[in-house]
Image (spheres, rainbow, N blue to C red):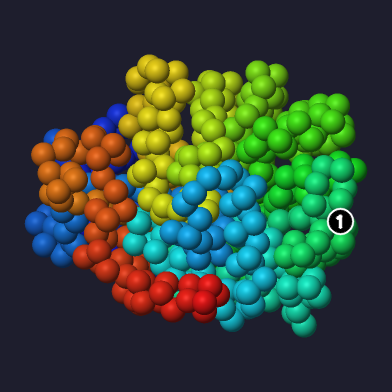
Amino acid sequence: MPLTRWLAEYAWLPDQAEPTPDVLIEAEGGRITAVTPLVGGGTPAAGVEVLRDAVRLPGLTLPGLANAHSHAFHRALRGRTHYGRGDFWSWRDVMYAVAPRLDPESYLALARAAYAEMALAGITCVGEFHYLHHGPDGTPYADPNAMSAALVEAAAHAGIRITLLDTAYLTAGVDGAPLTGPQRRFGDGDALRWAERVSAFRPENDHARVGAAIHSVRAVPAEQLATVAGWADRNGVPLHVHLSEQPAENDACRAVHGCTPTRLLADHGVLGRHTTAVHATHPTSADIALLGESRTGICLCPTTERDLADGIGPARRMAEAGSPLSLGSDSHAVVDLFEEARAVELDERLRTRRRGHFTAAELLAAATVAGHAALGWGDAGRLSVGGRADLVTVRLDSARTAAVPPVGAIFAAGAADVTHVVVDGRTVVADGRHLTVDVPAELQAAIAEVTS
């Protein structure tokens, strides 16, 4: 790729408490080659000609955002599950009504539109927690990884990177109950057959990597947890797991195993630096210590956790214990990493009735560098030389951000304020418009296909 230059009105550079004005960013081959603050830093060697050639980025430019936890097919549920009474389990019944209607072709269309919506929101990489593996009755497709391939192709069409977190989902409960109904398409029989299938899927695209996931302690028997964790460790890939999203999960685990889900995962070698626990809404103090001491990451999904009435997790305590925090949109009730980021602080205020738990820089890190690291892209999420050339520019003159100082954008801006998105040096969104996907039209068509 040729040398490209961008002149950012403001840019949030690594390890800075607030944005820096007038920054020239240069990239070649998809990598950042120079970052030059012009105020107090002078002009580049080539002088004004360089500035004349640069693409102007009015507003605040950030590193690419990472959506560390996604279920792409849940996008079809938006606006259909939010009414009346109920809880996570009643919501799940509605979700299970959509799951059987997807095949590789319809999933490609839905995920392509969902990932393009993410690109419009400034998301340059997604972690897809993928368990729709087989046909609706559990019969594998001719290509057992056809659904995985559809998701990888969808991300390519949308212009973003993907870590496909291939998910082991083997049982319907902690007690080992068999999968029935819509769940049958999730299962591979046992962890060894799961590993055999996943090992056969090797995307050739540079934008895609394969990771592993344990759906939860409900879905993988205790004696098979180490098989999944061992596969991830041998292959050097991220491992994610839903953890303590619901009190009922904790209660069931104690009833069967005599311990919390976190303790069970620790005893079977699942926790560690390359593991991310998703939600962790209801950990005990001992759980928080186990997660922190092992440096297990925590992916918070505040808009989903509040939509499903899951509760508010102890984010500050987990961060202080040593667990890096990342963010995900999960069920896609909202696709807005700015909302997810500020919700970490605002929900902590609700839980504690105090303000000031996280700085704007800490929240930005959760949405960028920590999220990319959790997905295995350790060279992304920072505007620094050698890093991936991912840039997200946010308006500072919209109705939401007018008169807001740049540092305040994390608390004021939303996905609608994203104007320009660059992924690995390629422009994907310009002037708030996706360059290759008509996102509203494709969402409309794809969702109608699986819900009507």
Q: Is residue 95 left or right of residue 360?
A: right
Q: Quadrant of the N terminus?
A: bottom left
Q: Quadrant of residue 20?
A: top left
Q: Is residue 101 left or right of residue 36?
A: right
> Residue at 74% across / 75% down in the picture?
135
- The vertical placement of 220 against 449, above or below, is above
Residue behind mark 1:
178
Helix, strand or loop for disc 1: loop
Task: Kindly give the residue lying farthest to the right in the view shown.
Answer: 223
Q: Is residue 95 left or right of residue 415?
A: right
Residue 60 x, y percent position in the rendering? 22, 47
Residue 209 x, y percent position in the rendering? 61, 61
- How many numbered marks have been drawn onto this rendered protein structure? 1
> Residue at 80% across / 47% down in the picture?
173
Q: Quadrant of residue 201?
A: bottom right
> Residue at 44% across / 18% down in the picture?
352
In-front residue for pair 78/213: 78
Label 1: few (<14), some (14–19) or many (≥20) C-alpha neighbours in 10 Å: some
The answer to whether residue 425 shows anywhere in this view is: no
- The vertical placement of 166 against 427, above or below, is above
